[in-house]
Image (tube, rainbow, N blue to C red):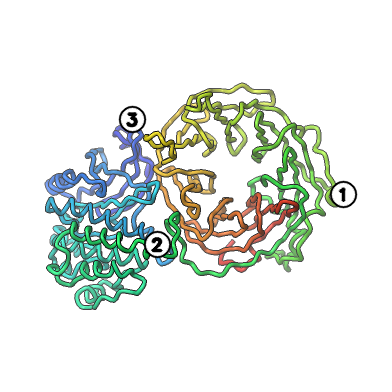
Amino acid sequence: MSNLLTKLLYHSNYRLLGLIGQGQFGRVYCASHRKTGRFVALKELNRDRFSTRKFLRELRFLLSLQHPNIVTCQALEHTATGRYLVMDYCESGTLRSLLSEEIQLQPLQGLSLIAQILAGLDHAHQREIVHCDIKPENILLTATATGWTARITDFGIARLSQELSTDGFGNTGSPAYMAPERFYGQHSPASDLYAVGILLFEVLTGYRPFSGLPGELMVAHLNQALVLPETIPEAIRPIIYTALQKLPARRFRSAAEMLGALQDAIAHSEQNLMQGWQPNLLQRSSATGAIVPVQYAYQASLQTPMQQLATLQDHSNTSAQPLYRVFSNQIGCQWFSEAELFGKTAGGQGSKLKSCTDLSSIPITTIQLPEPVLQLIICPQACFVATQQAVYRLALAVQTDSVQQPNQTVSLPQQAAPQLIARLKQDAVLTIEPGGRWLATATPSLDKTQSQLNIWHLRHSQLFKPAIALAINPCFQLLALDTRHGAALSHVTDASGNACIVGTQIELFTRRGTLIGCISLPIPLRHLCLTQTPYRLLALEPGYPNSLVLLDLKPLRIERIGLSIAPKFLGSTSWGYLVMDETGQIALINRIGQEIGQIDGPINPTAMVLLNDYQIAIATWNGTEGSLAIVDLRHLDLDIVF
């Protein structure tokens, strides 16, 4: 986003948060209202394409459409750069993201989206407004606690495109979804229903009934007979056949008629539609790649269960890596060298896995605290340890060069003794800025209706008092987003008195203690963690155990990733994400949300940490014994380039 555009919009009612798309007539931005914080989409309308007369006429049509399944035009924003339509913001992208051969959408979810599209079209058709360009890219999604809501966008824009096509701008529309008559410049409500028929076929199969280049698509729509695969339920087949009739008069007479037929079919075939699907599964990966067996680079036996693994996230030093482990009230640190694990090839290029090295041969530096450790955070200059009642600072463990016996315990030097930096009340949650400059804690009030947010500065060695204190909603997690900003996360409950969690609220604050905004998410979340992409979080969704949520805060975007496993441990790398379930199965996901591989990992995992982009440390415990192992992804048969 250019600085010039930001300055020109400075005096508008909206604050730009990022570019989210490029439409036919201009760019689309995510923005927030400066006073209310409400999210909107600002749709730029190019003056060269839209004359003022045509623009005002189409704006009149847009303002007449008020329906839950239509993206509503709220206002018009004039700036020095041009005109912008202020539209409802849909944070989950377009229907296109759910329609793929790599992803299978739960049938009832897909049919529900089609029913919502028909409801929106019925509202428009009753007002004699035809969309003319129904396609997945023009169906926006908002996340809900039970799935998604579909909302049709670009009403009026598509209508004007028809006029512009006769003014020298060429044919418009999407040939893959165009009714036969549309290729001859004709359109009617039945043309929109034909496009919905294509969508209905696609949500059930993952592909379209007709394919090819634009000319080939035209011939197919006009002449090719429709063939339905056997996977489409019997009750749905007549609806698709009727919607995709070549002649408009043979299709459904209205969107309401098609919606009624679809609802009846769903009611009569719900059990068949859900065959092979769990109710709490929204989507799943259809990838059929082989599961790779695990190989260990390091391995050692454990005599006590390990609650957490941690390391310094500095990948520049490849010669040695510290691995911190937490068990009860003790913290141990081992340094491992890659030279001990791998034999270098000639010239120092590449590496080859040697036989599995016993981790117990490497000395452990340990320290004991007065109470059990709840959280260990590693920063560049120090370690921070949180217990139920306090936060301590530890100096980073120093690698020792002395020769010691296997499993020998070495005491930390005097300067690394635990240093108390904050006293906590019971049930406090905390976060520490990645550079170790400040600490934020949230403590619930006695009546549990709010939390007290305290921010502590950590640059000095003496004890501190809170720098500021703010009252926020009851907080279940704190996150330091960057060096200056943090986020307090709280649950949103329904208003019926049942106290059911229906959403998540994110309150943003600065390190100086100023609340700068609030984001209300329509889905419950838990176990959020940072990624290597700024302002992008990974999260789990309680109601859908096989769902991984990618949450972007700037601009706001919510994306669900359907997995073949139910993730419990999360990790982020430069190439994507790594998740592991409670049985030890590991799924690898690239940056665009596609599952690219699986590893048959160790059973009964208790902790996991990514040491770098290709090495994972995993602790296990079966009730009486366990192990600590390091897996190197470079030596597994995976389709990843490091």
Query: Which of disc 3 and disc 1 is earlier in sequence?
Result: 3
* Residue 401 or residue 357, whichever sits in front: 357
Query: Which of disc 1 and disc 2 is earlier in sequence?
Result: 2
Image-based side of 486 in relation to 320, left or right: left
Image-based side of 467 in relation to 179, left or right: right
**Residue corresponding to mark 2:** 274
* Residue 121 or residue 258, whichever sits in front: 258
Image-based side of 475 in relation to 27, left or right: right
Query: Which of disc 2 and disc 3 is earlier in sequence?
Result: 3
For the point 76% across and 34% down, the residue is 416
Q: Secondary structure at mark 3?
A: loop
Quadrant for residue 246, please give it: bottom left
Residue 227: percent from the left, percent from the top? 29, 76
Residue 335: percent from the left, percent from the top? 75, 49
Of tags 3 and 2, the one toward the viewer is 2
Residue 247 visible: yes
Residue 379 visible: no
Q: Are marks 2 and 1 in contact (CB under 8 Å)?
A: no
Quadrant for residue 638, please give it: bottom right
Q: Secondary structure at mark 2?
A: loop
**Residue corresponding to mark 3:** 35
Residue 75: percent from the left, percent from the top? 22, 39
Amino acid on which disc 3 is placed: Lys
**Residue corresponding to mark 1:** 404
